Image: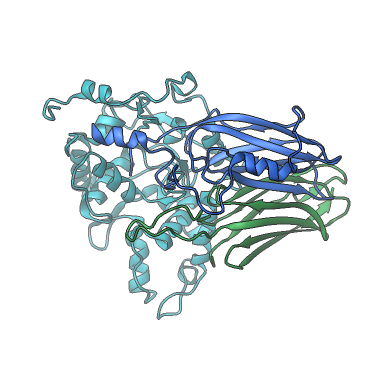
Chain colours: A green, B blue, C cyan
Amino acid sequence: MADAKPRVKVPKTANAGEPITIKTLISHVMESGLRKDKKTGDLIPQQIINRFTCDFNGENVVDMTLSGGVSANPYVEFDAMIDAAGEFKFTWYDDDGSVYEASKSIELA
Amino acid sequence: MTYTRRDALVVGASGIALLAATRVAFAVTGEEAIAEFTGGAAAGEGGITIKAPEIAENGNVVPVEVDAPGAAEIMLVAPANPSARLTSMKFGPASGAQRISTRIRLAKTQDVTAVARMADGSFIMTSQPVKVTVGGCGG
Amino acid sequence: MRIRAMKTTALTAAMMLGLGQSALAEPDLDARLVVNEELEITTITAAPAHLEGALEQIASGWHYRGETTRAMQADDFENPAMAFVDQGLAAWDTVDGSEGKSCASCHGDIEESMAGVRAVLPKINPANGELWSMEDYINDCRTNRMGAEAWNWDKGPMKTMTAAIAVQSRGMPVDVAIDGDAAPYWEQGKEMYYTRTGLLQLSCASCHEENHGNYIRADHLSQGHINGFPVFRMKQSNLVSMHNRFFGCVRDTRAQSYAKGGPEFHALELYVASRGNGLSIEAPSVRN
């Protein structure tokens, strides 16, 4: 979906080796494939974000698989740990092949 | 009032018409999802906690948090949903804690279940009952 | 059931108490809403004079929601409505229409130009003496100055834009004028508010004035203020506009409902907004 916009909260600085909380929100209808079109009675085909990853300076933080059982506008909160300044990369994979990305830099405190 | 009675039979929020009797071809049950995750191994207790509301205000958006220190992967299962496997999260080298907080859809009142695969290959599991209410006025 | 004879007591009897959970028995009026750890939101205040004691104090619908729902509004990175605000902010900067303009072309920075706007709407447009809602102003700009097509009152692009504009007034007190040229519309809205309609013979007041704090099936009845609109309704997992909610409420009394964007809901919007004069604009809020 072209208008899936991510919102990401990452602290501006962190101490090395100290867990930090990251919050992510992306607008996406997460069509489960179980709803019926009210007019035609046909099932509305599934279209969800099926995978979400977060990497820091190329190293994986989390790798999440999602299903239609995750609420629309998926909210994902998790913790990372950095050992140097660098960049977080967030990637959301849509069933239709679209890929949504966001990135945030962080400095050492 | 027929309106009230009819709607009392409809579980879950009207926005998601999860037909309880319908099983979609690819759907898994709670047992299947857990067995697939653990490879059939038994899951122990302790070391994993679920935080979820006692009563979910709306089945469409139920905040859930699972904490399993030392886990390599956590999976969330809703056994009474048409497809029970909700989500799973693997923790990589740059993760700061083995915790996931997200929002899930619950078709009806059930025991939300979390299973964690530990770094040594063992499994632990816990569940938390969550009541899902039928809403009030429509609109 | 004898519709004519239905009074408040019968209404209360017709409502099923939810699950009898004491945890949800009363709205938590002691809870406080602070957004992003810095913006204090006034969610309870003295009732405006024009209510003449109909309510002792006014409380935002926020108080009537569960703890986890209330918590979602405290952080803009947890509030699902903010994902829609972002879409509206992007549209603000997007050129649309034959004149090659975006909203920003004339209005510049949304945070500066739109601060306070939501708090005083709907209001009388001095140019024509009509009562205008935010949607009217938006479509007026689009059709007359941008050469763009009007947006449907209740579809995505309009809702996300009203959300992006409304959040610029977040924390400011609702302050709609009810006198002067606004008075006739206000009187019309007030009459609608207190008139029982439909097969169920319910007025807005039947639930929101006489039964706020009680349950309607498993839902907690609020005072029906609109300071939080557009709201993210968990039921639809989408933004919901004021007129959409009015439409649904009237339909649920089993009455013929009114058109979104029509004269009846304009008047009702003014009256209902005025009942919340003094509460902070809370948009975009999260409700059931």
Q: Quadrant of the N terminus of chain C?
A: top left
B48 or C221, which is in the foreground? B48
Among the 4 quarters of the image, the one containing residue C206: top left
Residue C39 appears anywhere in the view: no
Up-down relation of residue C7 to residue A20 (above or below): above
Residue A96, image x, y percentages:
57, 67
Q: Is residue C219 left or right of residue B33?
A: left
Residue B62, image x, y percentages:
54, 39
Q: Quadrant of the C terminus of chain C?
A: top left
Q: Is residue C33 left or right of residue C182?
A: right
C23 or C258, which is in the foreground? C23
Residue B55, image x, y percentages:
51, 29
Q: Is residue B47 left or right of residue B101?
A: right
Up-down relation of residue B111 to residue C180 (above or below): above
Up-down relation of residue C276 to residue A68 (above or below): above
Q: Is residue C224 left or right of residue B54?
A: left
Query: Hey, which residue is sitting farthest front in the picture?
Result: B40
Q: Residue at x 39, y 25 (%)?
A: C18
Up-down relation of residue C8 to residue C158 (above or below): above
| Marker count (numbered) | 0
Residue C278 appears anywhere in the view: yes
Q: Residue at x 31, y 50 (%)?
A: C243
Residue B10, image x, y percentages:
38, 38
B124 or B98, which is in the foreground? B124
C96 or B117, which is in the foreground? B117
